[in-house]
Image (cartoon, rainbow, N blue to C red):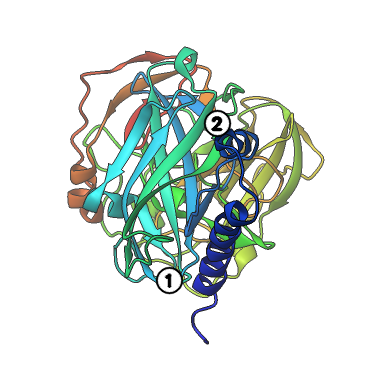
Amino acid sequence: MRGTPALVPLAAAALLLAGCTASGPRQVAAPPTAAAEVADAVPEEDITPVIGRVLSTPRAVPTTDGTVHIAYELYLNNVTNQTATIESVDVLDENGSSLERLDGDDITQWLKVSGATKPGRVLGPGQGALVWLDVVVDSMDELPASLDHDVTIGFDPGAPPIIPNLLTSRLAATDVDATPAVVISPPLEGEGWLNANSCCALTPHRGAVNPLNGAFHVPERYAIDYVRVGDDGFYRTDPADQLSSYAYFGEDILAVGDGPIVSMRSDLPEQAPGADPTGLTLDEYGGNHIVQDLGDGVYAFYAHLQPGNPLGVEVGQELGTGETIGLLGNTGNTDAPHLHLHLMDSPSPLGSNGVPFVYDSFDVAGDITAEDLAAKVDAGGPFTIDTTDARPAEGLYPLWLTVSGY
Ligand SMILES: [Zn+2]
């Protein structure tokens, strides 16, 4: 029986239920209405061989594309000893209307099977998977009160009638947190700041689902990596492995709100750019950093700062909005100078949950395409910035690949 622990209890439980139902009428001749009365009083049970839950209560953010994004994650687990293929995922609002649908092979770009080394949507026996969702609505007025999920799964082999070959399960219902996104000031000044790795594409930030302290944490869901693109479209000159090739290296990092520093680090050396560092310990990933308490249970994390605490800030110091707190550097887990910024619901940069935020006021200069980024990032540019939608912006979160002036 080794290797079949999940299916046996499921099948046994289902057969036990069926047996009880079948034996009842033989012993007591129940009137025709009795069955309906029982059905009304007792919720109907659905067998869900793939179970699921959302990792944290979704919370929305108004964004630079003129919509509102609700980015969150669905964790699925195939508890049978059969193969389960995810055929579709429908996100439903409280009225049962579909807000987002992932279908067929399109799912694979938003789904990662635990332990898998290549893209796919097949969960082996006992295997889990994460699905990254990005529900888009027109405005905060149209925010759903809750979300539910219809997940259609193919089982191979099925075990009808308990587990059919194709089953749609409704699972992982969740409320939507209607709390508005946190309003902050930008952490940088000047033109040409490119949002790398920010929401809501499945960038390395959204993909950073950290198994810490016995649970998943998604602190970087709305994190932004900033590099600056010059008027010529380049973010660096050659050679790539010299910090001096990055003109924005050493730019001022500004406090995004009022509040005290609750932790910081300033002893780590600059990494050589142009390559991923190796051998870092968990507490070195953010490099030199500052964690600031913004109040109401929200903390700001500024990472990869230059060493030596050049502004002389200290833990406990009350920062004011716009105050210079450090210099843009290349310390920790970084292959090019950049500022990493995210807001989170605890002082722990890795073991927390990401909180959405908007900037009070800034300028959208334009954006670049993912294809342009992929084609030119290794050469340092030149990126082609589409300035069609250039405009002043208030109360918005800059989406991935937006170029902003602050
Ligand atoms: Zn980052």
Question: Could you tell me which residue is drawn at 40 percent across and 36 percent down?
Answer: 91
- From the viewer's side, name the closer residue of 14 and 182: 14
Q: Position of residue 158 (x, y in %)?
A: 34, 66
- From the viewer's side, name the closer residue of 10 and 71: 10
Q: What residue type is labelled 2?
A: Arg
Mark 1, other Cα within 10 Å: few <14 / some 14–19 / many ≥20: few
Q: Where is residue 294 in the image (x, y as percent from the top left)?
A: 71, 31
**Quarter assignment of residue 14:** bottom right
Q: Specify which label sits upstream in the sequence, 2 or 1.
A: 2
Q: What residue type is labelled 1?
A: Gly
Q: Which residue position holds label 1?
A: 115
Q: Which residue position holds label 2?
A: 59
Q: Left or right: where does residue 17 sit relative to residue 199? A: right
Q: Does the residue labelled 1 lie within 8 Å of ligand 1?
A: no
**Quarter assignment of residue 365:** top left
Question: Could you tell me which residue is drawn at 59 percent across and 56 percent down?
Answer: 26
Residue 211 appears in the picture as rendered: yes
Q: Please, what secondary structure does the residue beneath circle 1 have?
A: loop
